Amino acid sequence: YPLFQLGGPQLRIFRPNFFMLAVRPGVPQPEDTVQFRVSMEMTKVDIKNYLEKIYNVPVAAVRTRIQYGANNKRNHKNQRVKTPDYKVAYVQLGKGQTFQFPNLFPEKEQDEEAQSFDDFRKKYLEKEQKIQKGDPRRGGVPDWFGL
Amino acid sequence: MAAPGGCRLLLRLGRRWLSQEPAVPPPPPPPPPPPGPLYPPVVASHTARSKAARRRRLEHFQRQVHEAASVEEKLRLYGKLQRPKYTVHPQTFALNADRWYRSFTRTAFVPGLPAEAAEEPGPAEEAGVELGALRSLACDALLQESFYQKKRRPFLYRDQEHTPGPFVTQLVSSLAASLCGHNPLLAASSLDLNPEVNYYWHHGEEVVVHGHRKGRVDPVRFQIDDKPHLQLRVPKQLPEIVPLESDLGDVPVIDHKPSKLPLFKKQYENKVFIGSKVSDPCCYGHTQFHLIPDKLKRERFIIANLEDQIEVVYRANGVASLFAWTAAQAMYQGFWNEADVTRPFVSQAVVTDGKYFAFFCFQLNTLALTAETVKNNPRKNICWGTDSKPLYDVVEEGSVKGFNDEVLLQLVRFLLNRPKEL
């Protein structure tokens, strides 16, 4: 959108495609930094206003970058298939707040029966695989090979 | 030839018999020197891609630096290899930068000044008689710069060099000149205007990510290039504040890469400089004066709702600049991370934005910050610092309102700091 100068018309945008998706950072980040994937049209100021006005989150600083999606994959017609580009925003929270991305898939505690059933199934599968492989003393030679 | 041989034998025997000496066996001939090694010593290769070869190259480099003939040669060899390094700016807008800088420089921060610098009744009483004179000096300088002198409107983002810069210069030079009588060290000092201070060091290790050196373990390199507003260099070192091995706080530990600060890498000359070359007699530091730039003014932080970052700017500036200065002074004396300092290096700094003054003291106890040397190194560098306090409230119609004497007194105490012998 064009820059606003004093006295100029206020160009408003209605229903912009502004979205923010909190993601787990690929590399360790400082404690006060949250990583988001945002819409390509959002600027740093937009991100700050979005978080502060809608979610009441104090934002100290925002840095953005655009991740280029590679164009190397090929489909069955050998045409190049592009993975989409996306914008990543690193938001530093204000007022000393910290954020740790939660573990979305915690390991559930299995009750006794399920655990013992799992162990039994694992042992059975191992035995089956050993029978499939054959006698280890034959060194991998198939059993139909012999006199 | 039996007869001559026999004559010689008889002569020999006769001579001995005639002299009637007791029969002394001739001294045994000296044992022949043990034969030298037939083959050269078996050492690791110099050029192989192995850990032993790397170790050997590293030891060769360390031996070269240890045996360097002069300090200039040592500094040249120390910074010979250029690689991408993080440029650490002492005056930065990054959030919580002082915590990071303390981690990079292994510094523990102690709020408040050390007891000796906080109250010095002796010299302060002598100067207390003239505190009025010093106060009038300060007010004169302030009024001259902000009221009497007719100046044009400052250009964008050049406010600091318009009024507070010249005020600080005038204040410091006039105070130093008037306190020369009380502190002979000031008389032998050298006041630098806009000097340059640089320091290059390694801290921690990382794996190279891109490029032809991918996969190798490299030390993380840092460089500070600082331009203080003013600097006082002296020929004698300031006394130590606490013993070398004292532990006054914790060093923050960061578990991610420094580039998340944000901090960026660049490759250029690895410079170590205190403001003057090695052969200058004033090779120890006394006080630095830093001016906060326009982009880091108080008002901008208040508008952005970041009041707690105001003090962070002062602290980060104090820690980084003083570490660079004291470490460069130590390197000028021949110490480096393999040859750690044997005596602490002390310097002071005043960080100001024209109205608010913050005072810092730094004691360098260790230079050994590389991954190998820091493992068994219990020493930490220590930085004392205060919050920023205003020197005056407002300048109105030819007079200064709300002049704060404590700030001036602290400044005078800083300038009067000297070694015990003087």
Image: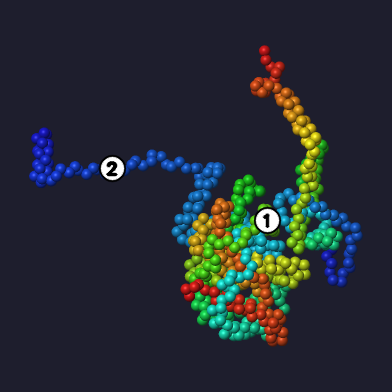
Q: Position of residue A145 (x, y in %)?
A: 69, 17
Q: Chain of mark 2?
A: B
**Chosen colour scheme:** rainbow
Quarter of image, res B314 = bottom right
CA gap between label 2 and label 1 equals 67 Å
Q: Chain of mark 1?
A: B
Q: Nearer the viewer, residue B139 or B385?
A: B385
Question: Upstream in the sequence, badge 2 or badge 1?
Answer: 2
Q: Which residue is mark 2?
A: B31
Quarter of image, res B127 = bottom right
Residue type pointed to by label 2: Pro
Residue type pointed to by label 1: Ser
Q: Secondary structure at mark 2?
A: loop
Residue drawn at the location 87% of the way across and 71% of the way down: A7
Q: Which residue is mark 1?
A: B259
Q: Nearer the viewer, residue B274 or B113?
A: B113
Callout 2 touching callout 1 (CB < 8 Å): no
